[in-house]
Image: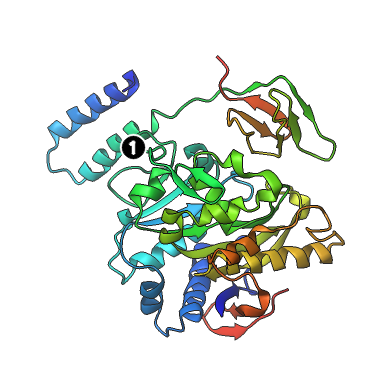
């Protein structure tokens, strides 16, 4: 759990303790559940990759490994860690 | 004969962007036409049994050309009204939360209200069990394998630079952990084999293609110059037939706009025939019972035309 999530839960819990039986209880519980589910979201890097070339007419050819994947917009190559966005190739796992 | 219904709403102010009420009218008319029932309640019950119901969207292009939230809202209205299906039994899903958010959906992984989440949500992810069919071996999103009892496949209709066609079968690539492995040879036979995986074949009950707008070239990314208003939705319980009709629409639009057919453009859609061969459905146009209907603001149905 992240620090921000923990503090948010503490604050909501304190409010709940003051107003038991509140109609806001489902919303609070839902909010806590969502905080757990979505605060964890992975932050993928968006650093431009190396070893690729743009194809005339659209798409890119990855040159990182012998597969030489041809990748269209918003798709990833065989490895799944590099993504084409509007014909610029990004590595998602930099750092 | 496999049945496919196309429902259009010619009187809509914006034929490329229906509102919730317009989608509701089209869905009601479409489901009744598809099932032959006179009551919407019976039509919905026959098509979508009770349980946890998944709605797999296509939100690849974010806010530009994704499964519209208005269609999902209208479908949810139909499922929850008079059908004893609770809002929290509905699960709208995609590969990632980012894609859903960018397409205009409000994320919700809680126990209250309609759920809307990506496979990359904490605690979800992909199943640890492999499923295999033919050339495809993969792990499914746990939303598909464990959360939902049945699934409604709700793609958009567009051309695809590798597969030729992106509709229902291609939308199932968003349910597996390694879609990038299955794009060779124009996704043939892979797109068919993905939909033939035991869990997907068993749980997919309805294909509902949003064809308010259709992109007939330059997909799967968004290219507005090839996006046109078609003004309808396509429904079928046969996933192959639904895609076959989608392909027919794409080909006619390409011809109308002086573009070569997908086969001539080097992107033949071979996986539909493979799908028929392995018993997923019907790809032969002569064996598909296609109904094209128009609906008006009163919900009255008239016969319509494909294009």
The spot of residue B163 in percent (x, y) is: 69, 51
Q: Is residue A51 above or below residue B214?
A: above
The spot of residue B187 in percent (x, y) is: 65, 49
**Which quarter of the rendering shows the N terminus of chain B?**
bottom right
The spot of residue B253 in percent (x, y) is: 77, 65
Viewer-nearest residue: A64 or B249? A64
**Which quarter of the rendering shows the C terminus of chain B?**
bottom right
Q: What subunit carries mark 1?
A: A
Q: Is residue B65 above or below residue B289?
A: above
Q: Left of B133 or right of it: where is A90?
A: right
Viewer-nearest residue: A84 or B81? A84
Q: So how many labels did they put on this image?
A: 1
Viewer-nearest residue: B154 or A4? B154
Q: What residue is rendered at 64% in x and 58% in y?
A: B271
The spot of residue B57 in percent (x, y) is: 51, 52
The answer to whether residue B182 is visible is: yes
Which residue carries the number 1 mark? A34
For the residue carrying disc 1, how many other residues have a C-alpha within 10 Å: few (<14), some (14-19), or many (20+)? some
Q: Left of B26 or right of it: where is B163?
A: right
Extreme residue in the top direction: A95
Q: What residue is rendered at 53% in x and 70% in y?
A: B236
């Amino acid at each position: 759990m992240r620090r921000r999530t923990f503090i948010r839960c503490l604050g909501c819990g304190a409010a709940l303790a003051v107003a038991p039986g509140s109609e806001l209880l489902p919303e609070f519980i839902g909010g806590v559940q969502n905080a757990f589910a979505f605060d964890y979201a992975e932050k993928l890097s968006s650093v431009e990759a190396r070893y690729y070339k743009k194809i005339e007419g659209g798409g890119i050819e990855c040159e990182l490994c012998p597969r030489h994947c041809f990748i269209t917009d918003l798709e990833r190559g065989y490895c799944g860690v590099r993504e084409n966005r509007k014909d610029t190739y990004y590595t998602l796992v930099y750092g | 004969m496999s049945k496919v219904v196309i429902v259009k709403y010619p009187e809509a102010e914006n034929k490329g962007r229906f509102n919730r009420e317009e989608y509701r009218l089209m869905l009601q008319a479409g489901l009744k036409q598809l099932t032959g029932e006179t009551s919407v309640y019976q039509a919905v019950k026959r098509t979508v049994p009770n349980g946890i119901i998944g709605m797999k969207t296509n939100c690849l292009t974010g806010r530009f050309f994704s499964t519209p939230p208005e269609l999902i809202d209208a479908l949810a209205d139909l499922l929850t009204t008079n059908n004893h299906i609770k809002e929290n039994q509905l699960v709208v899903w995609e590969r990632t939360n980012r894609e859903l958010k960018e397409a205009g959906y409000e994320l919700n992984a809680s126990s209250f209200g309609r759920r809307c989440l990506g496979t990359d949500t904490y605690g979800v992810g992909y199943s640890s069990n492999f499923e295999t069919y033919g050339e495809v071996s993969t792990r499914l999103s746990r939303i598909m394998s464990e959360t939902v009892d049945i699934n409604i496949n709700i793609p958009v209709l567009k051309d695809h630079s590798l597969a030729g066609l992106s509709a229902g079968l291609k939308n199932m690539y968003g349910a597996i952990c390694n879609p990038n492995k299955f794009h060779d040879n124009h996704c043939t036979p892979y797109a068919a084999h993905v939909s033939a995986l035991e869990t997907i074949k068993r749980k997919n009950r309805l294909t509902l293609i949003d064809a308010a707008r259709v992109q007939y070239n330059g997909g799967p990314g968004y290219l507005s110059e090839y996006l046109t208003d078609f003004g309808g939705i396509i429904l079928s319980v046969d996933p192959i037939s639904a895609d076959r009709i989608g392909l027919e629409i794409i080909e006619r639009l390409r011809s109308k706009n002086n573009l070569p057919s997908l086969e001539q453009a080097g992107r033949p859609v071979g996986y539909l025939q493979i799908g028929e061969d392995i018993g997923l459905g019907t790809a032969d146009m002569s064996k598909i019972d296609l109904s094209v209907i128009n609906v008006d603001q009163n919900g009255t149905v008239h016969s319509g035309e494909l294009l």
